[in-house]
Each structure stands twice: as C-alpha cells, then as structure tokens.
C-alpha cells in the first residue's frame, strides 16, 4: 500500500535565454542561443524537496532558410 501526503513547500529558481544573431544572408539566418535554468524546492521545515532537477545550461545553434529550420543542440 502506498501512502502519500501533501506538505507546504517553497520553490525558487530562474530561467534565462539569450539569442544572438550570427549571420543573415542569401544562405539563410544563423542564430546562437545560450540558456540556463535552476529550481530549488524546500519544505517549510527546511528539508529539501526530493527529485529536483540540477542546474541546467547549454547552447543551441539554429539555421533557418525559407520554410526549413535545422537545430544543433
């Protein structure tokens, strides 16, 4: 038998993304995206909420021409 209970918790975090256009000519447009996000959860008694994802960051390169888009992540 599984017994679950709801407890009061506070969640804090951020999400950010920056898009930088690198190239725009007859061959298409190339953009670089830099991103990061983080979430921290604590119960009101000070204990950590289990299963929270770690800090995430990365980049993505996009190439667009006409109706086609290619993404490298």
Image (cartoon, rainbow, N blue to C red):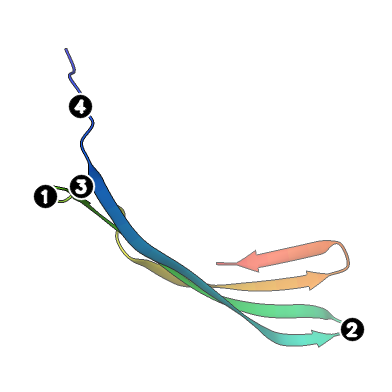
Q: Secondary structure at mark 2?
A: loop
Label placed on residue 65: none
Relative height, residue 1 to residue 30 (above, below) = above
Q: Is residue 71 left or right of residue 37?
A: right
Q: Write down the residue under mark 1.
A: 47
Sooner in the amino-acid sequence: mark 4 or mark 3: 4
* Label 4 close to label 2 by CB (< 8 Å): no
Q: Is residue 51 left or right of residue 45?
A: right
Helix, strand or loop at mark 3: loop
Which residue is under mark 4? 5
Residue 29 sits in quarter = bottom right
- Identify the residue under disc 3: 49
What secondary structure is found at the residue carrying circle 4?
Answer: loop
Residue 50, compared with residue 72, is above or below; it is: above
Residues packed near mark 4 inside 10 Å, few (<14), some (14 to 19) or many (20 plus): few
Tell me if residue 5 comes above or below residue 17 in the rendering.
above
Distance Cα–Cα, label 4 vs label 3 = 13 Å
The correct choice, above or below, for 17 with respect to 54 in the image is below
Q: Quadrant of the C terminus?
A: bottom right
**Tag 2 residue:** 26
Between marks 1 and 2 in the image, the one whose residue lies nearer the viewer: 1
Q: Earlier in the sequence, mark 1 or mark 4?
A: 4
12 or 56, nearer to the observer: 12
Dot 2 surroundings within 10 Å: few (below 14), some, or many (20 or more)?
A: few
Q: Mark 2 or mark 3, which is nearer the start of the sequence?
A: 2
| Residue 70 appears left or right of 47 | right
Give yes or no for contact between labels 3 and 1 (Cβ–Cβ under 8 Å). Answer: yes
Of marks 4 and 2, which one's residue comes earlier in the chain? 4
């Amino acid at each position: 038998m599984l017994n679950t209970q709801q407890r009061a918790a506070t969640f804090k975090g951020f999400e950010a993304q920056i898009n930088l256009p690198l190239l725009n000519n007859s061959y298409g447009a190339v953009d670089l995206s830099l991103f990061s996000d983080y979430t921290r959860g604590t119960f009101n008694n000070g204990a950590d909420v289990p299963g929270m994802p770690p800090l995430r960051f990365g980049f993505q390169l996009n190439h667009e021409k006409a109706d086609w888009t290619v993404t490298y992540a």
